[in-house]
Amino acid sequence: MKIPGKSFLIAALLLACILFPFQRKVTAKTYYHVTLKAFLDPHDVSAVEWAWVTLVAIPKNEAYPEEAALAESYGGSLRGSVLAFVRAAAWRSEHRYTIEKRCKDRPAEMKISWNESWNDSVYAMGGLDNPNNPDELHFGFTTRPIFLQNKRWFDPMSRSYAALGPVRLEGEAAEEIRGNFILRPVNYRDALKHYNFCGKQWVEQYRSEFNHFHLHEEFYDDDNEIFNQTIGKKHIVYQVLRTSSRIHPNWKQQRM
């Protein structure tokens, strides 16, 4: 009676050894940690914005079950993955600059400034849309509905947005509020951009360089890092790290 017991135990251990790698492969998650640095003024390299985003890959059929069911009904399948939102943050440096203009037909300067600020809300999403190339990805900041890591959809526009207006100090002129203050892909706690020109002072909503920024990139040569920059109207340097770790290595650190 002892031998069958030993045989059963050995068989169970072998089965566990065979199944364990498979189970680990099924439950493993792949995270994408994005770090971005935007240069706001070509004449001042200290004028910058930083953003940090973590996304996790989830099969598309879990994000779009109805579409997946429709594809299956025709004998196909919904392939690829969604890069679901895990967390994001952004930071803006203090900056002041002037623009030469004319006031009452005389040379004058318009003073523009904003204060250092962290964000209250940042919204982004991505995807691996090419099933034949899992190294190809797209990413962007958006106010459209985003898929969360808990496999639920969230509409940023459903969240109320409140912005603190200019604070009037005793003895100083009040600043006029111009334009609309609305929810954007990147929102700072201090949403104000200050103007001073021709005897008038006013504020508008600060618009981040990351608003509606998108990229389409690819990992090459089995590398798990992308490091690149945009060339043109927006100068943004970015890094994308692909890893099994949920921890963003640069989280709220001004480094890449």
Image (tube, rainbow, N blue to C red):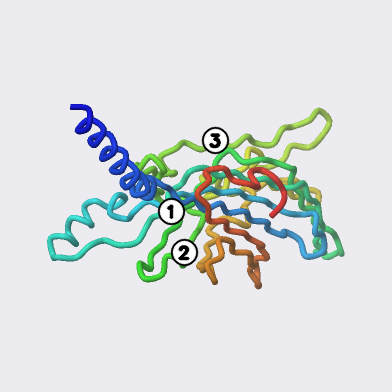
> What whole-number distance in Å separates the C-alpha atoms at marks 2 and 3?
33 Å
Disc sitting over residue 83 in the figure? 1
Q: Are marks 2 and 1 in contact (CB under 8 Å)?
A: yes
Which residue shows up at 44% across the image and 37% down it?
159
Q: Which quadrant does the C terminus fall into?
A: bottom right
- Element carrying mark 3: loop
What amino acid is found at the position of numbered circle 1 in the picture? Leu
| Disc 2 crowd, CA 10 A, few/some/many (<14, 14-19, 20+) | some
Q: Which numbered disc flags the more N-terminal residue, 2 or 3? A: 2
Residue 108 position, x and y percent, is 85, 60
Which residue shows up at 14% across the image and 65% down it?
75
Disc sitting over residue 137 in the figure? 2
Residue 104 visible to the viewer: no
Q: Are marks 2 and 3 in contact (CB under 8 Å)?
A: no
Which residue shows up at 42% across the image and 65% down it?
134
Q: Which numbered disc flags the more N-terminal residue, 3 or 1? A: 1
Residue 94 position, x and y percent, is 77, 46
Q: Quadrant of residue 191?
A: top right
Q: Which numbered disc flags the more N-terminal residue, 2 or 1? A: 1
Disc sitting over residue 162 in the figure? 3
